Image: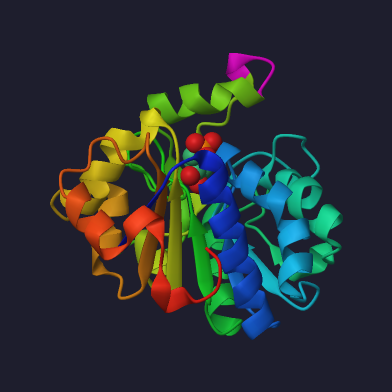
């Protein structure tokens, strides 16, 4: 696992945007695994300028999102489909038909989960998977104790996740309590994984993921098994890392010489 500690949230955002743009430049038909949440908001806002700066093409990409709330239709303002259309598809000029998410209002959510898993495989798998991390260490909506070999399925959200998501809904009773999410094994199948963590609230979860035991109690720790996983974090999210000296020796200032160019 490559751990890059950058000084600020802005630096993390810019670095991630550059990695994404370079992926698209190298392979315009990339299949991207996309994520939602506040961390990704900043990244997607930075992406149009970075795609232009890097001279990348974004129109030919395809994407699969990590997850969607069960019970919300795609036109619900808090659905992840709506989030992706407004933050990514429309501003970047990507045809929404190229951007896949599980259908939250499918009549048979379990069948929808299986269909989604198969669709990822049919697309040839994911080239680059973006991930945030929940305060409890979840990735996608794989809550603690999710099987490390799980595939796309329905998960019941923890109370703390429901509470964290409540800020996006008018009434607490409207916050969904279940989601269709890629499984941990689905995520590990991606050819490359990029996890972003910013802010002090993520420090404990990040330390458990990187330096703790491989454990279902810390779903993000499964990335320890991935051959090409990069973690981008800011100073605040890095605060609980015990081996920080080592990461900074290998990548001073969060620089990644193997990547090339200004990062
Ligand atoms: C939700 C999403 C995750 C995301 C997490 C953190 O739970 N399902 O994919 O990583 O939120 O979101 P934020 O970036 O807002 O902290």
Classify residue 156 as left or right of residue 241. Answer: right
Residue found at x 58% / y 15%: 172
Q: In which quarter of the image is the N terminus?
A: bottom left
Whether residue 208 is situated above or below residue 35 in the rendered picture: above
Q: Which residue is drawn at 77% across and 76% down?
A: 57
Q: Quadrant of residue 221?
A: bottom left
In magenta stretch: residue 68: no
Residue 132 is situated, as x and y percent measured from the top left of the image, at 47, 48
Q: Is residue 17 left or right of residue 76?
A: left
Asked if residue 169 shows in the view, the reply is yes
Q: In terms of depth relative to the viewer, which is nearer, 170 or 238?
A: 238
Q: Is residue 101 left or right of residue 126?
A: right
Q: Residue lying farthest top?
A: 171
What span is in magenta? 169-173
Q: Is residue 58 above or below residue 11?
A: below
Q: Main secondary structure of the magenta part?
A: loop
Q: Which colour scheme is used?
A: rainbow
Q: Is residue 190 at all visible to an observer of this figure?
A: no
Expressed as whole percent of the image width and height from the top left, the position of residue 186 reads: 42, 67
Q: Which residue is more in the foreground, 159 or 27?
A: 27
- Spot occupied by residue 94 in the image (x, y as percentages of width and height): 82, 65
x%, y% of residue 78?
A: 70, 34
């Amino acid at each position: 696992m490559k751990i890059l500690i950058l000084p600020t949230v802005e630096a993390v955002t810019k670095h991630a945007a550059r990695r994404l743009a370079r992926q698209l430049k190298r392979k315009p038909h990339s299949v991207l695994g996309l994520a939602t949440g506040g961390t990704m908001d900043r990244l997607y806002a930075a992406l149009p300028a970075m795609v232009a700066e890097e001279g990348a093409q974004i129109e030919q990409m395809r994407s699969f999102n990590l997850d969607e709330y069960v019970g919300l239709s795609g036109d619900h303002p808090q659905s992840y489909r709506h989030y992706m259309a407004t933050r990514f598809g429309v501003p970047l000029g990507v045809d929404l038909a190229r951007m896949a998410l599980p259908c939250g209002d499918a009549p048979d959510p379990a069948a929808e989960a299986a269909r989604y898993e198969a669709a990822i495989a049919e697309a040839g798998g994911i080239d680059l998977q973006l991930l945030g991390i929940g305060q409890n260490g979840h990735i996608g909506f794989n809550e603690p104790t999710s099987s490390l070999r799980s595939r796309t399925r329905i998960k019941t959200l923890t109370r703390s996740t429901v509470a964290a998501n409540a800020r996006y809904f008018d009434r607490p009773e409207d916050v969904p309590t279940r989601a269709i999410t890629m499984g941990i094994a689905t995520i590990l199948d991606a050819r490359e994984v990029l996890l972003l963590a910013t802010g002090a609230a993520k420090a404990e979860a990040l330390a458990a993921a990187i330096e703790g035991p491989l454990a279902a109690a810390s779903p993000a720790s499964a990335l320890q098994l991935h051959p090409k996983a990069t973690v981008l974090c800011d100073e605040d999210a890095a605060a609980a890392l015990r081996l920080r000296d080592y990461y900074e020796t290998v990548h001073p200032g969060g620089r990644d010489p193997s990547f090339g160019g200004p990062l």
